[in-house]
Amino acid sequence: MVVETRRSSAHAKCILLVILLIAYGCSYGPEKKELGFNKYVGPDRVLVLLLPPIAGRGLQYERSGFIEAVRERGFEVDMKVVDVNPMLYLQGRIVEVLKNEIIDPAKASGYSRLLLVGISLGGHGALLYVTQTSQDIDGVVLLAPFIGGFVIDDAIREAGGLTQWEDCPSIEWNYACDMWNLIKGFLSVPGNKDKIVLGFGLEDGFAESNQVLAQQLPPNNVFKVSGGHDWVTWKRLWIKILDYYNVSCTSTNPAYCPIDTRGGHDGM
């Protein structure tokens, strides 16, 4: 358990270092125009878009059994597992590139619904996207998302929660406060809380910030398991969430169903 906690903490610090560079306005040359991705086709017109952790390669979703788990449960969806160069985060272009190169073309091609899935840094990207262009996305699954900050979690808790929190701590970096303000504004809109499903390991380095977000969501939309910041934990969470969708999204009254990903269903 000690080794696992240290590994999770190391991953958390690595991701935090990458995101910190955004605050300093790093400038880099142009990247490749197109995002790479692997596509897994189903008969339905629902697209599940999966964003990878910090390494930027989406192939690990398949290697870790995420695609197989979706098919085993009968979800008839198309899936795109995206390769994301971390430089897109450093340049502050991740939302723009996702929208222009994948999401807008997908909607134009006839997809009726879109679910965005992100792990760790990919979860950060998913949060950025849904809080800035929520009309494009029907649901978001966040697994151990990096949100940002050093002391802001404590400040939000001391304020009584995100709804009551207002002031950015003087020793906090502005990017983290801006991110939490984006989330606060998004969650204040009726219906938006139901769009987010969150899962994280209790020993994850991001567990504290994830818990702050969890307190703002419907309880049925939050999943926790023992484990750290690793694919084994994320796979366990993914299966729990898929099983939740399998039951809730096919019921007669799905109270907290961000998106109906079962084939043969017309509604959300």
Image: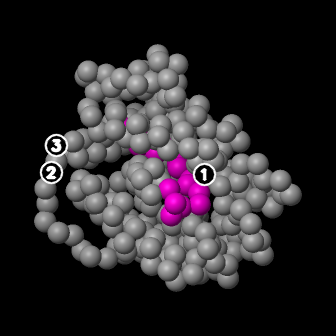
Residue type pointed to by label 3: Tyr
Residue for badge 2? 26
Residue 241 in sight here: yes
Q: Percent from the top left, x then y, of residue 126?
A: 45, 54
CB atoms of marks 2 and 3 within 8 Å: yes
Q: Residues within 10 Å of mark 3 (few under 14, many from 20)?
A: few
Left or right: where does residue 163 sit relative to residue 88?
right
Callout in the foreground (2, 1): 1
Q: Find out whether residue 250 is within the magenta segment.
A: no
Q: Secondary structure at mark 2?
A: loop
Badge 3 element = loop
Residue 237 appears in the rendering: no
Residue visible at 16% across and 43% down in the picture: 24
Q: Please, what is the three-letter code of the amino acid marked with disc 2?
A: Cys
> Magenta span covers which residues?
134-148
Q: Which residue is mark 3?
A: 24
**In the visual, does 133 lie left or right of 32?**
right
Residue 113 lies, in percent from the top left, at 61, 69
Q: Where 111 sits versus 122, above or below?
A: below
Horizontal side of 248 relative to 33 (left or right) equals right
Could you tell me residue 122's position as x and y percent? 42, 55
State how far apart marks 2 and 1 are (Cα): 32 Å
Q: Nearer the viewer, residue 78 or 230?
A: 78
What residue sits 56% from the left and 44% below the top?
189
Q: Which residue is mark 1?
A: 195
